[in-house]
């Protein structure tokens, strides 16, 4: 995510940290480079100009120029200003005391509203709410069917009617939700290829009749300034409570993320980080600023781990490690839990700076994990628990069953033996409470 802007910022910050002493000229040169980076990332030029002005005002102060580590001080100022630019603190969804709470999703066609509706429903369900999806897009072919498919995939019902009146559909959906104890109705409204009066009038009528507790503007994160300009128009005509940036896992340059809060004065509430329905993150300005500057995002990494890890299994594994009973079955369980956290390349991007630099350019082959899982699945329970019994004939059988080679199996067993030796070394080192929650 935002790899291009991250790399460019990293180069500038490296130069800043490299100066033993900073002068106003050093700082001015660096800020000129940062301004160019922001404009290339499609950040609104007024926002970029104000950002540079705010950083410069703080960076040329005496506390920086006379500091023992002036480069680090300037980096800290840039981080603070980036965080402020994107909202300073996270703003969660506002829920009222009404049943159901209505969340209305608006935006242009193709921005990802329908997929986000499913992601949000899944997210809220995991938070303990009981959501209902409402199909209010009566214009786009198969839009209603698409929402039903999304709802079925996450086991959340979809309310739909054979009607061409979205206002009537939504009113009936709210009544249905109230009677059937759904506490949240997520309305997937129709988008258009462009903004027009007919579209806006329909959304205004929907707002008046459904009285949503939240209206979320869905913007395609890859469209940069176009997303910001569209958001301004929606804000003038409809008003909304927050922004969702979708497709942030693609080649998004970051312009929308860095501009939209400053231009609309509305918080970014969520970002879509993949196509799968579990790839949604609540937006945290401080974490995004940290990612942009190459400092990683350990908090998000830990949250992903906590969500994926089976705590009961983790405790049992700790006990087995103490007794030197780590088997290929345990190894397989660890692989499964890591894969639940998402693509490995994405996890590496959340690591702090030094780790990220060390892994720079390394492409993680997810197929290797699939191959390892296939090999372990082709073994008998006894072979998984006691890999040393795998002789030549057994290895041939496993290779045939997993579609791999004997060399692949030998490579896996060598890696496993190295892990076992490492665990023993950790124990000899006096490490109490050895844990392997999501790594090996």
Image: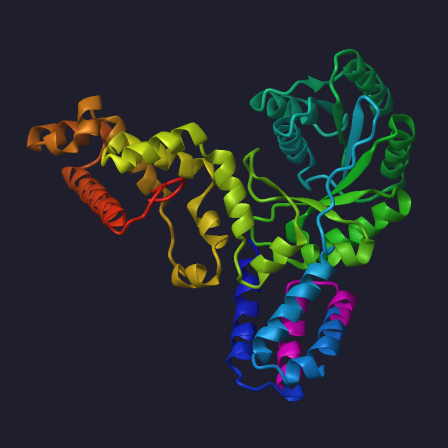
Q: Which residues are magenta?
A: 26-50
Q: Residue 83 is drawn in which quadrant?
A: bottom right
Choose between 199 and 103: the one closer to the eye. 103
Q: Residue at x 87, y 43 (%)?
A: 239
Choose between 400 and 174: the one closer to the eye. 174
Where residue 429 appears, as percent x and y from the top left, is 26, 52
Residue 15 in sight: yes
| Left or right, residue 97 beside residue 119 | right
Choose between 39 and 12: the one closer to the eye. 12
Model colouring: rainbow
| Left or right, residue 263 beside residue 413 | right
Q: Residue 32 is drawn in which quadrant?
A: bottom right
Q: Residue at x 23, y 32 (%)?
A: 403
Q: Residue furthest top?
A: 179
Q: Residue furthest left?
A: 392
| Left or right, residue 223 beside residue 344 | right
Where residue 216 appears, as percent x and y from the top left, is 77, 39
Image vertical order of residue 24 relative to residue 424, above or below: below
The majority secondary structure of the magenta stretch comes to: helix
């Amino acid at each position: 995510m935002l790899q291009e802007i991250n790399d460019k910022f990293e180069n500038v910050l490296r130069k800043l940290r490299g100066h033993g002493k900073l002068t106003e000229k050093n700082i001015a040169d660096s800020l000129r480079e940062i301004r160019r980076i922001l404009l290339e990332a499609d950040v609104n030029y007024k926002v970029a100009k104000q950002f540079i002005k705010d950083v410069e005002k703080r960076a040329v102060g005496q506390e920086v120029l006379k500091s023992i580590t002036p480069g680090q001080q300037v980096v800290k100022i840039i981080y603070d200003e980036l965080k402020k630019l994107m909202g300073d603190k996270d703003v969660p969804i506002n829920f009222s005391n009404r049943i159901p709470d209505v969340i209305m999703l608006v935006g242009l066609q193709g921005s990802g509203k329908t997929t986000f509706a499913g992601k949000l429903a899944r997210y809220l369900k995991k938070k303990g709410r009981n959501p209902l999806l409402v199909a209010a897009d009566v214009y786009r072919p198969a839009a209603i069917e698409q929402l039903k498919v999304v709802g079925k995939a996450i086991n959340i019902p979809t309310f739909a009617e054979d009607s061409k009146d979205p206002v009537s559909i939504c009113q009936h959906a709210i009544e249905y939700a109230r009677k059937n104890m759904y506490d949240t109705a997520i309305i997937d409204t129709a988008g258009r290829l462009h903004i027009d009066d007919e579209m806006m009038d329909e959304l205004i009528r929907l707002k008046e009749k459904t009285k949503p507790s939240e209206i979320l503007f869905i913007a395609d994160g890859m469209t940069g300034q176009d997303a910001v300009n569209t958001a301004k128009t929606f804000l003038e005509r409809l008003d909304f409570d927050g922004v969702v940036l979708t497709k942030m896992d693609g080649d998004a340059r970051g312009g929308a993320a860095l501009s939209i809060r400053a231009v609309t004065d509305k918080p970014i509430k969520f970002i879509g980080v993949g196509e799968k329905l579990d790839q949604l993150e609540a937006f945290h300005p401080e974490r995004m600023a940290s990612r942009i500057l190459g400092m990683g995002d350990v908090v998000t990494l830990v949250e992903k781990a906590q969500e994926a890890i089976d705590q009961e299994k983790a405790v049992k594994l700790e006990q087995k490690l103490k007794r030197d009973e780590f088997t290929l079955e345990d190894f397989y369980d660890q692989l499964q839990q890591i894969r639940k956290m998402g693509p490995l390349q994405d996890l590496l991007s959340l690591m702090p700076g030094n780790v990220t630099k060390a892994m720079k350019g390394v492409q993680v082959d997810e197929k290797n994990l699939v191959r390892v899982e296939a090999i372990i699945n082709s073994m008998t329970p006894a072979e998984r628990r006691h890999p040393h019994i795998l002789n030549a004939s057994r290895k041939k059988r496993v290779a045939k069953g997993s579609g791999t080679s004997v060399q692949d199996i030998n490579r896996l067993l060598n890696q496993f033996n190295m892990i076992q030796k490492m665990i023993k070394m950790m124990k000899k080192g006096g490490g109490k409470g050895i844990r392997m929650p999501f790594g090996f």
